[in-house]
Amino acid sequence: MCGRFTLLDLADFIALFPWVAPPEQFAPRYNIAPSQPILMLSNLGGGMLDHAIWGFLPNWAKGGPDQAKPLINARAETVAHRPAFRTAVRYHRCIIPASGFYEWKQTSSGRQPYYITLADGKPMLMAGLWEDSHDGAGGEIRTACVITTAASESMRELHHRMPAILTPEDAIRWVKAPDSDALSLTEMLAPSGQEFTKTPVSRLVNSPANDTKECIEPMPSDDEPTLFG
């Protein structure tokens, strides 16, 4: 699954999508959690990164996030057919940029967070969906979710699911292809063959209130020997 991620820099992401203009204001995010604002590049074009709330709500969901349960992830295997997502797959696809994401591993002393990045240091291009829905107060709210797929072989030790991370070429197809090709695009939502770096980090990341660089600083995991054994 994907329940936390980071976005530390936009320069490398913008370089992959040269028609996209960066937002006027940007600050690094070290611990992005559900219900918080995220940046996304939607299939509507326009050359701008849009803001959305992480937690997808179908437009037929009434009452807003307080009454309907926002969906932070969508499973790649069922996303094209599940009622909550099937319209968005055709009309409302997006790329959610990330520098890395977090996953937790059960150890003898509790759940140890790991920070996962691409081994080549490039940005992650997570496939996502977005929707304009009701905010519960008579207005609209733009919402989004991350599509997940089965974990790659190197990731299975941490979790059986992971974000659907696209190559730059597939990411462009995801947001640029005609809506009539949407169902064929779901074939790209497969386990990533890219190499990852998995770094044990502080349990500070367990709380969404902590959004500082200390969240990604390496530390020994409970499964690794320390200086004193």
Image (cartoon, rainbow, N blue to C red):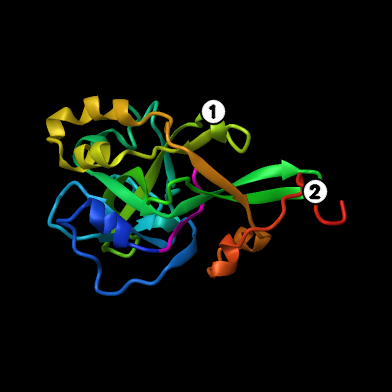
Picture quadrant of residue 76: top left
Region rendered in magenta:
1-8
Q: Amino acid at mark 1?
A: Glu
Residue that appears at 21% across and 52% down: 17
Badge 1 marks a residue whose secondary structure is helix
Work out whether residue 125 can be spotted: yes
The percent position of residue 87, horizontal first and vertical second, equals: 24, 36
Foreground residue, 213 or 127?
213
The percent position of residue 116, horizontal first and vertical second, equals: 53, 48
Q: Is residue 198 magenta?
A: no
Is 170 drawn above or below residue 71 in the view shown? Answer: above
Q: Is residue 143 left or right of residue 33?
A: left
Is 10 drawn above or below residue 146 in the view shown? Answer: below
Foreground residue, 37 or 18?
18
The residue furthest bottom is: 25
Badge 2 marks a residue whose secondary structure is loop
Q: Amino acid at mark 2?
A: Pro
Among numbered discs 2 and 1, the one appearing first in the sequence: 1
The residue under label 2 is 225
The residue under label 1 is 153
Q: Is residue 2 magenta?
A: yes
- Magenta part, dominant SS: loop
Q: Is residue 145 left or right of residue 169?
A: right
Q: Nearer the viewer, mark 2 or mark 1?
A: 2
Is 208 drawn above or below residue 165 in the view shown? Answer: below
The percent position of residue 54, horizontal first and vertical second, equals: 40, 55
Work out whether residue 210 can be spotted: no
